[in-house]
Image: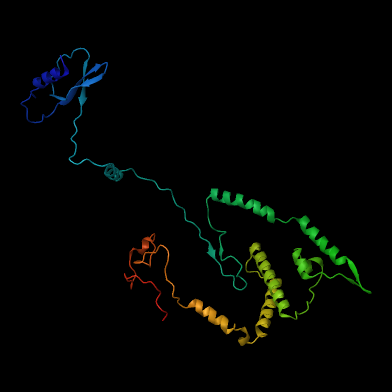
Amino acid sequence: MSLEGLRREIAEAGGGGAGASQAPIGGRYIALLRRTAAGMLFSDPVHVADGQALPDLPDGVEYIVVHPYTAPARPQTLAEHLSTNALHGGARSEPEQRPVALPVLHDYGSFSSFLPGCDSSQTSLRAADYAVLNGCDDERRAEQRVTEAEVASAVEMARRALGDASVDGEAGTQAAISAEMLRDLGLTPADVGLGETEEPEPATAEEILRQNSAMLVQLVELQERRARSGDYGAVSAEERAVASKLHASLARVAGASAPRDLLPPSSEIQRTAKLLLASGRASFAGTLPPQRRFAFMSNVAGLGVPAGATAAPMQRAPPPK
């Protein structure tokens, strides 16, 4: 007997023949199948009432239970399915965020133009971040590290330079060493047992400017040394002396000329003024749209029209008021 004949026999035994118009209540649906060399053949589902005995199936014919499912009138898309099921998802655990210590702003008072404006020594990072920073900083620290042997060698070089005597004409005098040479060696006159010597006042404007430049460089080096020490507020006596000397020299330069001498020529003033006035050239160029010159195409904030904007193309900048 064929699968369709067996299905019809089971349907008639359960009272669900061709004249049945209502869906059955209770029971189950089964489908007959037969295994062949070409594959498995299935029959249409058939309803089996509760307590209904199935007929003896021939050899090679089996049945499976089919669970009915009513499809909705409008199929649900994958995006709708994911968004609906996301509301019923399990509780999500967020990693605990520990508070971050921000850098502390500092005000060092005078002579702080070259010092850092914040202290980040109390900021908190992860252990992995500290390891990366320390690893990157090891090489730089190794290059900047000065050994005691290098300091002793520099001191000995300075002593030999001060001890060498050179005969100048008939009078034998010691070779003089300047403070700049000691500073190049990383020393001060006090390190080699000498006192500060009074340097002659510069006579020309070029010498004054050259001396001011040297004092500015020295002041920067002293402030960097103070910053590396960690005690930003401790201004050394040497730094105060250099700053005071530089202040007096700048006042001397400013007072040596009258205010009218500091004015540039009238031709230079006129040339500079022309650069500030509106020109007759186009005020915009490139990819700016002529109807919206106030926003770039990629500027998402430029969707709103600013107050006073006009839709009429403007080819030239308005004259200055």
Provide residue 299's location: percent of width, then percent of height.
39, 61
Provide residue 253's location: percent of width, then percent of height.
67, 81
Nearest the viewer among 95 and 205 is 205
Provide residue 189's location: percent of width, then percent of height.
79, 69
Q: Quadrant of the C terminus?
A: bottom left
Provide residue 238's location: percent of width, then percent of height.
71, 71
Q: Is residue 87 left or right of residue 112?
A: left
Q: Is residue 134 left or right of residue 248?
A: left
Q: Residue at x 77, y 57 (%)?
A: 150
Occupied quadrant, residue 34: top left
Occupied quadrant, residue 296: bottom left
Q: Judge whether residue 53 can be spotted in this image.
A: no
Q: Is residue 32 left or right of residue 110?
A: left
Nearest the viewer among 123 and 23 is 23
Nearest the viewer among 71 and 204 is 204
Q: Is residue 60 left or right of residue 142?
A: left
Nearest the viewer among 5 and 302 is 302
The residue at the far top in this view is 59
Q: Quadrant of the N terminus?
A: top left
233 versus 63 height, above or below: below
Q: Residue at x 62, y 83 (%)?
A: 262
